[in-house]
Structure formats: structure tokens, C-alpha cells
Image: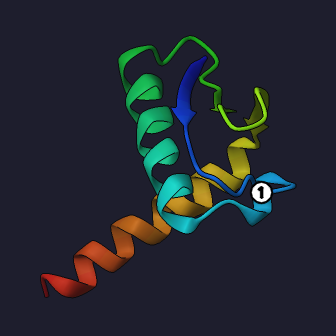
Amino acid sequence: LVIDFKTNATVPTTPEHCPEGILRQMGAYRHALSTLYPDRSAEAAILWTQTATLMLLPNALLQDAWQQALLKNAWQHD
């Protein structure tokens, strides 16, 4: 489990409402963990300091955000 502490003043109500940049960042972390430890489950969460709330992020949501980041990066360098 990778947890990132975020100090945003406005805390999203659901993972789907998280800023895209945060989802891409957490997707990259999850991808790195999956690569380093392929035989283990890789999970990600955000600890929102404003509300002291731990928000688990669905793997599918992070995978989609990570794939979008890769596609965007590839498109910009084409």
C-alpha cells in the first residue's frame, strides 16, 4: 500500500472526483510497486490532511489515469 499525504483545501468526495494529476501520480506509484513486486498486490490511497480521511483509490481508476498519462506523453513526443 502506498499512501500519499495531500494538503488540498478542498477534499474530493469520491476517488472519481480527484484531480486528474493526482490520479496520474498515484497510478505511477502503483505501477512502480507492481513492477518491483509483481507477486504482490499493489494498492494506493490518499490521506487528506484537511479532514484526516484515508481514501482508497480503485485500481481500475488508477490504471486508466496511468494509461492516459502514457498516451498523452507519447502523443506529445511524436
Instruction: Give the image quarter of residue 6.
Output: top right
The residue where tag 1 is placed is 12
Instruction: Give the image quarter of residue 19.
Output: bottom right
Above or below, 34 against 41 in this view is below
Q: Residue furthest right?
A: 13
Instruction: Give the image quarter of residue 44.
Output: top right
Q: Residue furthest left?
A: 77
Foreground residue among 52 and 3: 52
Query: Which quadrant of the rendered structure holds the C terminus?
Result: bottom left
Count of labels in the image: 1
Report whether 72 appears left or right of 42: left
Q: Position of residue 23 (x, y in %)?
A: 56, 54
Report whether 1 appears left or right of 31: right
Foreground residue among 54 and 2: 54
Above or below, 78 against 4 in this view is below
Foreground residue among 35 and 51: 51
